[in-house]
Image: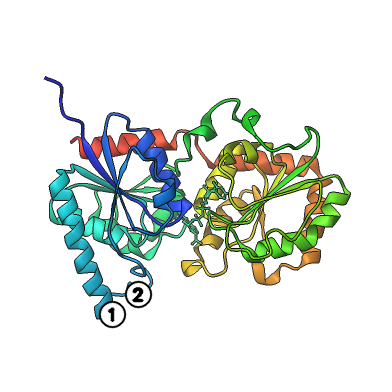
Amino acid sequence: MVDAPIKLLIAASGTGGHLFPAIALAQELPDYQIEWLGVPNRLETQLVPQQYRLNTISVEGFQKGFGISSLLTVGKLVGSVLKVRKILQNGQFQGVFTTGGYIAGPAVIAARSLGIPVILHEANALPGKVTRFFGPWCNAVALGFAVAAKYLPRAKTIYTSTPVRSEFLEPGVASSLDLSIPENVPVIVVFGGSQGAVAINKLVRECATAWFDVGAWVVHLTGDKDPEAESLKHPQYISLPFYNNMAALLQRANLAISRSGAGSLTELAVCGTPAILIPYPFAAEDHQTYNAQVFTSVGAALMFQQRELTVEKLQTEVLRLLQSPQELKVMGEKAKTIAPADSAEKLAQLVREIVEK
Ligand SMILES: CC(=O)N[C@H]1[C@@H](OP(=O)(O)OP(=O)(O)OC[C@H]2O[C@@H](n3ccc(=O)[nH]c3=O)[C@H](O)[C@@H]2O)O[C@H](CO)[C@@H](O)[C@@H]1O
């Protein structure tokens, strides 16, 4: 008789940074029967492959009020926990994997109250509040950056790095770039996480002419919330709200200008792309600065805080780097030292060890 497949519920929601690592893990577990737990109106409805059934619950705003201070928050949490318990029981799930954030609270409580093991992956150098609070309840907390362990003294932490989408690891993926850019020109990629960054978009549009003048091309991933996204036209400028083949694009790029979300950073590291990092100033507890510091501390990137970054400064730094291929090369090599390529495998191994025990 063939054994029934192991059933795993993946609770990952909201941003590319939370979804892509979970999708990469799911792809590493082809023999598992996987379902998703998300929220009805967030990015998971677009990004989660259809083969994974998406169960949704409403937990919007949960993380913000998470101080156990507001009755409303506690009420919402109890409601969400009950719903997740029902999903887990009805589906007879044997394990839960989560990438943290607001969906993780109810997922962890529901699973642990039923004795179901939970593996949490925390991608950031400074773990989020939910991870710090619920980490000790989990069977293991896998870390995107080793430095995060010091903020989780009571959790069972293990460093796995953050999994990237499988195409990042395919040899020859660079040739799949479907943007018409001449071969020998320097390419600058600009992106602001999975949602785009309007403030960076504005700065870059004001800087770009000087970069075009020295022959550079700019691929600008603006997100879909920038009303001026279409305002710059130039033969060396490609602007898109979102681009899927990041693996090819980051390998082609000579320089990236980016926010410092954990997902973007890990991909930059895997591709060895030198970067100028501009942490999102309103990220919870300024965690993007902590992420960026992992890169600046080894010389893999430069970091500028948005409040201090003027058009002149960004324009000049980029021109300087474009004229210093050796410096770019060294930054790219340093970036590669940060990300081990087998993160998805390691994480899948950890899930198997815990869920199949
Ligand atoms: C604003 C905010 O709080 N963001 C957080 C969010 O990630 P957020 O999704 O904002 O940012 P990440 O850098 O982690 O991930 C962005 C992902 O989107 C992809 N992408 C982006 C643009 C595009 O056109 N195509 C594309 O595929 C990138 O390749 C990357 O995989 O969760 C991360 C992981 O907890 C955190 O580190 C980030 O700080």
Q: Residue furthest bottom?
A: 70
| Label 2 vs 1, first from the N-terminus | 2
Disc 2 and disc 1 in contact, CB within 8 angstroms: yes
Q: Residue at x 54, y 58 (%)?
A: 195
Q: Which residue is mark 1?
A: 70
Q: Is residue 212 left or right of residue 161?
A: right
Horizontal placement of 241 versus 146: left or right?
Answer: right
Q: Can residue 314 be spotted in the picture?
A: yes
Report the quarter where the C terminus lies: top left
Question: Residue 154 location in percent, x, y?
Answer: 29, 58
Instruction: Give the alpha-carbon distance from disc 2 to disc 1, as whole Å.
Output: 7 Å
Residue farthest to the right, as pictured: 213
Within 10 angstroms of label 2, few (less than 14), some, or many (20 or more) residues? few
Structural crowding at the residue carrying mark 1, measured as other residues with C-alpha within 10 Å and reported as few (<14), some (14–19) or many (≥20): few
In the image, residue 161 above or below residue 80: above
Q: Which mark is residue 65?
A: 2
Q: Quadrant of residue 305?
A: bottom right
